[in-house]
């Protein structure tokens, strides 16, 4: 089935599902939405199975002319980087739908903003996300990049669980304006790219065709970079994220931080580096400064949070710092680590957000101080929370460790100082996770948590697959790395960098003592 | 235990050559898998497993022990060079030029640890059946204890620094879980968090050491790193060595990262015995001994290691004199005894093995004493204050006898374990020669005297004198499941030193393929027998002083407050926590608060200000949403217009 239009089908299924759901009675909406997302997941798994690791860089490609006057194409295709992020999206959406089962029809909902529209928006968002990762035409990418804002804007602004409508609207608008500013900068750069890149938007035609000797390359790079740095987000463009993640309903927060923000780091790796290799190398060290600040600053501010959701959001600022660090370290293992980090972070922070959501739905508060001693009352809830937390602090044996260590070692071989500073982040990560766990889960059970039920079976189904993936990818990340590595090698060639050789090379294979 | 061919193996530059696992040795992964599987079952099945959970927990560790024993005999049947057995498992992290294989290395060094971990661990598991009998969460306890054993086995069996690191953090996690086993007690939860955090500081060192190794050699496997060790620059070797030392300081509670170990005593006593005495805290010693090809080429790094060891052995011994809490005395003692091991592995070539001999002997005698302390606590309603003990020797004869065995071993009483392990280290320190040898030797000698003092004090306050029990306490001997492991370990405390010294080539000879041959340094300043007498004399002085102070006089119910400054300082653990608080915690809290403020009003404020500037007033930002769809349409229109203009221009150009 090599000609099967996998990406188009996978992208269209949720969209069609969303439209059907809008026409159905509410009580059918939830099972159908779950079914649609499961179908998408199954199709994605089948596509991953069909992906040829040793094959061409972009696979499942389709290219059709869309606006011939301007050389715009409907062009899709995935390399290993995009494929893993499409897979991340496909896994998270059913999880989020199941997790939002009751949130979506909370009594505060108005007629317009009910479970049905919520689920439809989630599915529309899935289409946009798959589109943004699969696009191989810069203009098409830009269209999805902007279009995915709309469903997310409504998910944050209209379905948030906080009682404070003003705060919620503020957060949604802030999210939108930040993204829009970034989007406009990128639009300017997209147009500029068209001009200098030979009047085409096709990624494959543009790579290597931007004149690197002219300063215009630097401006184009910055246009894309700032858009992506806002999206990711890196310090100092991050302040929209805690507000948005805190006010969004948990399901939307998971998709926001788990996937939507990854478009930023994905864009850095997929667009900034190959399209503007010279500028990427020039600006690289400055970007690394932002990354290290993000890592340390995000972690320190996370430690000081009193609100569970804001805390997790700030930890993500630190994590995005790690991802971008790996990308701009210009080593193959650093970039493989960064890509793996994007996937792992989706599962890890997703799991953390989901369990935080379980806690909030029980207590009716997001404040850390309103919890305490949950472990005695609900040990499974506490146990899963701890495990998700441990993956957040990158405990070896869990998937996040593999990616974080690759990023650090990938940075170390080229930029020692940055790597050493970033490594200090592992102490801070332990601090924010363990302080949060201690305050919410340990100590004598507070009166308000005494009647907390333990994980329900629905909640177990939500969280167990995530934790299982975190563990499995920590012990055996090879299948995922095998998919990612060739794409990263191609990117390294695009920016014409090679890994620094060891100073005292040893023959590894002979000393392994294997035949 | 033939060592004839093995010295040729460690000719500098060659690096150890590992042979492929065959036969029984291909099952080395089973050693880890058994306790790991058991941990998974116990932690995931829930209450249904309450009835048999503890039995499964014990059985898995004992099976690993038996398998380990079988492997020991198989290993003894091989000649020296063939005892370095590597088993490749699977490709763990393949990422371009960064490749990490998951594999296990079974050599004399890891074999020693496997037997220590599963042997002493097995005994402590059995003891826990009785000790935790009344705890409703005994099943979870065994699950976490199994998890620890699995992680510790991975730590010593991993054949690269990165697989070692997984075990390293795994034991840290198990330690965190078990210190906080009664996490409904805020003190336990805080102690657990502290242990993890301080260890993470050490982990920064270990992580950076691994990165530096990769940058230097392009691999993190033992075989690769060690084969290139003698070709690296001296500065690199020192850098790697000192970073490894930082990691070791965290895990082994060595100065300046020692402060977590005293708080770790919040965990159940079997945990203190297994993790915080016999095994996990010795991981730092393992790390340095394992990395011997690196330390061989860096005298500076070795000097750093010896300084840390000497400082900690005195530091721990000093604070051990001041506590009334029996577990904290033993914890301080552990710190001090591990200091001796660190000192030994720091002295370096030829002496590494002495550190491991002390490690194994200490595993026996310290575990014996911790289990004895647990037995005493069991009999006194979990009281840990030695001022409320007294006269327990008649009521708890087995506890008393086994504890005495541990006591005589630790103070280096002739022919008990410590006599062969600790005293050898003191001699080796003197034999190092030069000023450093004299200083280190004197420190170690002084430490022996202080050790005898605080241990005699502990014995006197606990088992002798008149009873000072609290009301309602009627001590009696612990159940069989607890005394049996104490007896077994007590026998070890008596004989381990002699056995490991005299059977065959001794443990040091057995370890030669891993650590290089044992050798004498410069000719001894004082003759060996003279040194032995000197050490005994110093220890006797310490013991006699303690006897006069605590054995002859009655022990008051509360500690005297009119004491010299040094005693007050020792009671405060030499202000380790105060320093941490002043240097890290407070400034950290201020920084965090300041940054949170800055984030809300600085960074965000600047952006909002900018928005206000552009939009005329910050209120407009909020109003945008009221007519949002219109605004959005407008903005989209603006964007589209820009595209069209841009493209038109592009065509025009």
Image: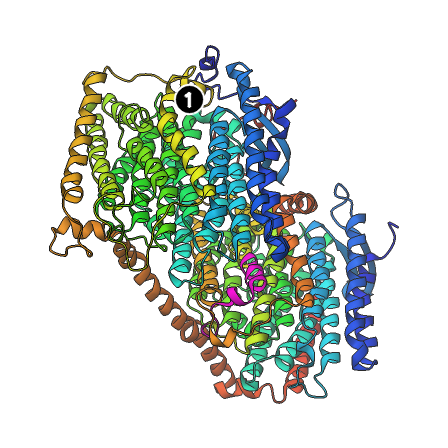
Residue B89 position within the rendered picture, expressed as x and y whole percent measured from the top left: 64, 33
Residue toward you, A158 or B429:
B429
The residue drawn where x is 47% and y is 51% is B132
Q: Main secondary structure of the magenta part?
A: helix
Residue toward you, A416 or B242:
B242
Identify the colour scheme used. Answer: rainbow
Residue toward you, A280 or A405:
A405
Q: Is residue A370 magenta?
A: yes
The crowd level at tag 1 (other Cα within 10 Å; few <14, some 14-19, many 20+) is many
Left or right relative to B532: residue B397: right
Left or right relative to A395: residue B193: left
Q: Is residue B394 magenta?
A: no
Q: Which SS class for mark 1?
A: helix
Left or right relative to A187: residue B277: left
Highlighted range, magenta? A369-388
The residue drawn where x is 64% and y is 65% is A260
* Subunit bearing disc 1: B
The residue under label 1 is B507
């Amino acid at each position: 089935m090599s000609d099967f239009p996998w990406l188009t089908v996978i992208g269209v299924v949720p969209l069609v599902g969303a439209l059907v759901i809008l026409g159905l009675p509410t009580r059918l909406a939830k099972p159908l939405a779950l079914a649609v997302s499961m179908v998408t997941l199954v199709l994605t798994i089948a596509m991953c199975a069909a992906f040829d690791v040793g094959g061409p860089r972009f696979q499942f490609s389709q290219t059709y002319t869309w606006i011939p006057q301007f050389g715009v194409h409907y062009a899709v295709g995935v390399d290993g980087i995009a494929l893993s992020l499409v897979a991340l999206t496909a896994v998270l959406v059913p999880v989020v739908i199941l997790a939002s089962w009751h949130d979506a029809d909370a009594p505060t909902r108005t007629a317009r903003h009910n479970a049905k529209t919520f689920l439809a928006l989630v599915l529309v968002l899935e289409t946009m996300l798959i589109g943004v990762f699969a696009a191989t035409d810069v203009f098409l990418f830009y269209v999805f990049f902007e279009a995915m804002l709309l469903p997310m804007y409504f998910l944050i602004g209209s379905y948030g669980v906080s009682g404070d409508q003003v705060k919620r609207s503020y957060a949604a608008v802030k999210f939108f304006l930040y993204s829009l500013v970034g989007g406009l900068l990128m639009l300017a750069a997209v147009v500029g790219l068209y001009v200098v890149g030979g009047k085409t938007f096709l990624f494959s035609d543009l790579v290597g065709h931007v004149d690197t000797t002219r300063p215009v390359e630097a401006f184009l790079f910055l246009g894309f970079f700032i858009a992506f740095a806002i999206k990711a987000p890196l310090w100092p463009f991050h302040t929209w994220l805690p507000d948005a993640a805190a006010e969004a309903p948990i399901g939307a927060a998971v998709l926001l931080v788990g996937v939507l923000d990854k478009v930023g780091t994905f864009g850095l790796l997929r667009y900034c580096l190959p399209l503007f290799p010279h500028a990427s190398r020039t600006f690289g060290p400055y970007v690394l400064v932002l990354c290290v600040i993000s890592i340390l600053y995000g972690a320190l501010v996370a430690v000081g949070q009193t609100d569970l959701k804001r805390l997790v959001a700030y930890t993500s600022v630190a994590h995005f710092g790690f991802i971008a660090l790996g990308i701009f370290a210009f080593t193959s293992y650093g970039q493989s680590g960064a890509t793996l980090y994007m996937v792992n972070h989706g599962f890890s922070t997703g799991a953390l957000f989901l369990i935080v959501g379980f806690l909030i739905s029980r207590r009716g508060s997001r404040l850390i101080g309103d919890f305490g001693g949950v472990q005695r009352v609900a040990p499974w809830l506490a146990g899963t929370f701890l495990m998700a937390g441990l993956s957040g602090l990158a405990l070896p044996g869990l998937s996040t460790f593999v990616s974080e260590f690759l990023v650090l070692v990938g940075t170390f071989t080229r930029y020692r100082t940055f790597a050493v500073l970033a490594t200090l982040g592992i102490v801070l990560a332990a601090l924010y996770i363990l302080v949060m766990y201690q305050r919410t889960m340990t100590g004598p059970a507070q009166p308000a948590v005494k009647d907390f039920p333990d994980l329900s079976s629905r909640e177990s189904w939500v969280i167990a697959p995530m934790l299982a993936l975190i563990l499995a990818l920590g012990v055996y990340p090879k299948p995922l790395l095998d998919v990612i590595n060739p794409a990263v090698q191609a990117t390294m060639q695009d920016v014409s960098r090679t890994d620094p050789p060891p100073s005292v090379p040893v023959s590894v294979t002979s000393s392994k003592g294997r035949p | 235990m033939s060592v004839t061919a093995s010295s040729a193996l460690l000719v500098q530059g060659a690096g150890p050559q590992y042979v492929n696992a065959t036969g029984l040795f291909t099952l080395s992964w089973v050693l880890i898998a058994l306790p790991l599987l058991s941990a998974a079952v116990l932690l995931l099945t829930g209450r249904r497993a309450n009835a048999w959970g503890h039995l499964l927990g014990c059985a898995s560790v004992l099976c690993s022990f038996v398998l380990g024993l079988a492997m020991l005999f198989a290993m003894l049947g091989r000649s020296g060079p063939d005892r370095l057995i590597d088993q490749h498992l699977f490709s763990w992290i393949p990422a371009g030029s960064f490749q990490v294989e998951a594999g296990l290395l079974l050599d004399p060094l890891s074999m020693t640890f496997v037997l220590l971990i599963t042997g002493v661990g097995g005994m402590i598991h059995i003891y826990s059946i009785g000790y935790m009998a009344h705890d409703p969460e005994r099943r979870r306890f065994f699950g976490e204890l199994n998890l620890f054993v699995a992680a510790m086995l991975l730590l010593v069996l991993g054949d690269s620094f990165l697989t070692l690191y997984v075990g390293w953090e795994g034991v840290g996690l198990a330690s965190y879980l078990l210190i906080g086993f009664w996490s409904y007690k805020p003190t336990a939860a805080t102690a657990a968090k502290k242990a993890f955090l301080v260890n993470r500081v050490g982990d920064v060192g270990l992580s950076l050491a691994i990165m530096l190794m990769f940058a230097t050699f392009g691999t993190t496997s033992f075989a690769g790193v060690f084969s290139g060790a003698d070709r690296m620059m001296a500065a690199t070797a020192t850098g790697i060595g000192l970073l490894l030392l930082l990691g070791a300081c965290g895990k082994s509670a060595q100065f300046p990262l020692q402060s977590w170990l005293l708080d770790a005593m919040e965990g159940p006593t079997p945990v203190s015995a297994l993790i915080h005495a016999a095994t996990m805290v010795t991981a730092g010693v393992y790390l340095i001994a394992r990395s011997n090809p690196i330390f061989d080429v860096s005298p500076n790094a070795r000097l750093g290691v010896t300084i840390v060891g000497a400082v900690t052995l005195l530091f721990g011994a000093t604070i051990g004199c001041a506590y009334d809490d029996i577990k904290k005395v033993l914890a301080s003692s552990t710190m001090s005894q591990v200091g001796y091991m660190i000192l030994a592995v720091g002295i370096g070539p030829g002496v590494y093995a002495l550190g491991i001999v002390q490690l194994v002997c200490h595993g026996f005698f310290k575990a014996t004493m911790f289990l004895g302390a647990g037995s005493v606590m069991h009999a006194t309603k979990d009281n840990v204050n030695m001022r409320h003990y007294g006269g327990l020797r008649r009521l708890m004869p087995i506890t008393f006898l086994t504890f005495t065995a541990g006591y005589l071993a630790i103070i280096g009483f002739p022919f008990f374990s410590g006599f062969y392990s600790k005293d050898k280290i003191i001699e080796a320190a003197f034999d190092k020669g030069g000023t450093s040898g004299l200083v280190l030797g004197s420190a170690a000698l002084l430490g022996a005297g202080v050790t005898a003092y605080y241990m005699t004090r502990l014995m006197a306050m606990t088992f002798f004198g008149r009873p000072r029990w609290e009301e309602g306490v009627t001590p009696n001997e612990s159940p069989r499941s607890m005394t049996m492991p104490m007896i077994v370990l007590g026998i070890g405390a008596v004989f381990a030193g002699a056995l490991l010294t005299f059977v065959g080539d001794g443990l040091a000879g057995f370890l030669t393929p891993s650590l290089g041959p044992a050798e004498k340094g410069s000719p001894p300043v004082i003759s060996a027998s003279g040194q032995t007498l000197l050490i005994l004399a110093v220890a006797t002085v310490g013991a006699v002083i303690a006897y006069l102070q605590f054995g002859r006089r009655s022990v008051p119910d509360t500690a005297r407050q009119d004491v010299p400054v040094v005693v007050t300082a020792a009671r405060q653990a030499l202000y380790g926590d105060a320093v941490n608080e002043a240097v890290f915690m407070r400034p950290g809290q201020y920084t965090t608060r300041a940054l949170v403020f800055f984030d809300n009003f600085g960074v965000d404020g600047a952006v909002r200000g900018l928005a206000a500037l552009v939009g005329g007033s910050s209120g407009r930002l909020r109003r945008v949403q009221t007519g949002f769809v219109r605004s959005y349409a407008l903005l989209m229109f603006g964007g589209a217009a820009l595209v069209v203009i841009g493209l038109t221009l592009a065509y025009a150009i």
